[in-house]
Amino acid sequence: MPSPPFALPQNVRILPALIITLGVVLSLRAAATARAAEAAQDGASDAAKSETAASPKAPAAQPAAVPAPANPAPPAPASAPTGGDAFAAQAGLTPNELSVLQSLGARRELLDGRERALGDRTSLVEAAEKRLEQRVAELKQIEAAIQALIGKMDTEQEARTNALVSIYQKMRAKDAAAIFDALDQDVLVAVASRMKDQSLAEILGLMQPAAARRLTTALAQAKKLPEEAAQLRPPPNG
C-alpha cells in the first residue's frame, strides 16, 4: 500500500520531541543510578567501619623467616662480670660509686697508717722525755751529793783553819813570823785573815819585809773581792 503523501513531514515533527523525551529519561535514569551507587558506597563504608570497630586489629605482618645456616656457629658466651663489677652489682652500686668507695678506703688506710706512725713517734718522744727526766733527776742527785761533799769538806777545812789560827795566836810572835815567811800564800792568807788584829800585827812586824808586803797585799785583795761581789749582786726584789 503506498504511503500517505504527508507522512514524512509528520515524522519530521515527531522526531525532535522523541529525542528530547529520550534525553530527559536518560538523564533521570543516570541520576537515579548515581544516587543508588552513592548510597551503596555509603552503606559499604558504614559496614566496613562497623567491622573494624567490632573485630580486633589484625596482627602486623611478620617478616619472612630467614633459613638457618647448615652449620650454625655456637653463641658467644656472655662475658661474666669481674669481681669488682659482681660486688658492685650485688651491693646495688655503679662501677663509678664502687671506684669512689675504693679510693676512700685506700685514703682511709693511708691516714690510719700515718696516724699509727704519728702515734709511734709520740710514744718514742714520750719515752725519750721520760729518760731525759730520769737523767736530770739522777744528775740533780749527783749534784746534791757533790754539794754535800763540798760543804762537808769546807766545814772540815774551816775547822782545820780555825785550829791553825788558834795555834798561831797562842805561839810567840817571833816563832809565828818565822813560819809565816815560808808558808804557802793561800794557806797564809786563809789563816791570817782569821786572826785577831793585834796578834797579826805583832807577827807582821817580825816577818821578813818582802813576805810581809806580799801578805798585806793578799789580805787587802781578799777583803776587796767580797766587797766587789756584794756590789755586783742584784738588789733583792721588793
Image: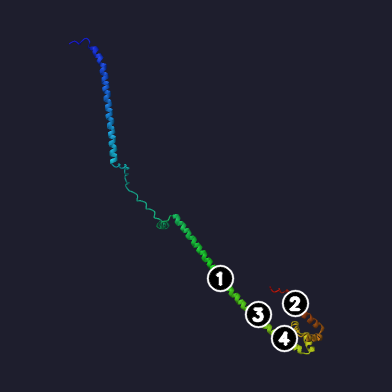
Task: Tell me what residue is drawn at x 24 percent, y 13 percent.
Answer: 10
> What distance separates the C-alpha of mark 4 from that of mark 2?
23 Å
Does 210 appear above or below 235?
below
Q: Assign the C terminus to one quadrant of the image.
A: bottom right
Q: For this view, does 232 lie left or right of residue 61?
A: right
Amino acid carrying label 3: it is Gln
Q: Which residue is mark 1?
A: 126
Give the secondary structure at mark 4: helix
User: Are there few (<14), some (14-19), or many (20+) residues within 10 Å of tag 4?
Assistant: some
> What distance separates the C-alpha of mark 1 from that of mark 2?
48 Å
Q: Which residue is mark 2?
A: 227
Q: Which residue is mark 3?
A: 147
Does 129 appear above or below 74?
below
Residue 121: quadrant of the picture? bottom right
Q: Nearer the viewer, mark 2 or mark 3?
A: 2
**Comes first in the chain, label 3 or label 1:** 1
User: Are there few (<14), some (14-19), or many (20+) residues within 10 Å of tag 2?
Assistant: few
Amino acid carrying label 2: it is Glu
Measured from the top left, where is residue 236 in percent x and y? Answer: 69, 74
Q: For this view, does 225 lie left or right of residue 135?
A: right
**Comes first in the chain, label 4 or label 2:** 4
**Comes first in the chain, label 4 or label 3:** 3
User: Which mark is on residue 162?
Assistant: 4
Residue 60: quadrant of the picture? top left
Residue 152: quadrant of the picture? bottom right
Q: Assign the N terminus to one quadrant of the image.
A: top left
> What distance separates the C-alpha of mark 3 from that of mark 1?
31 Å
Task: Tell me what residue is drawn at x 65 percent, y 82 percent.
Answer: 149
Are dots 3 and 1 in contact, CB under 8 Å? no
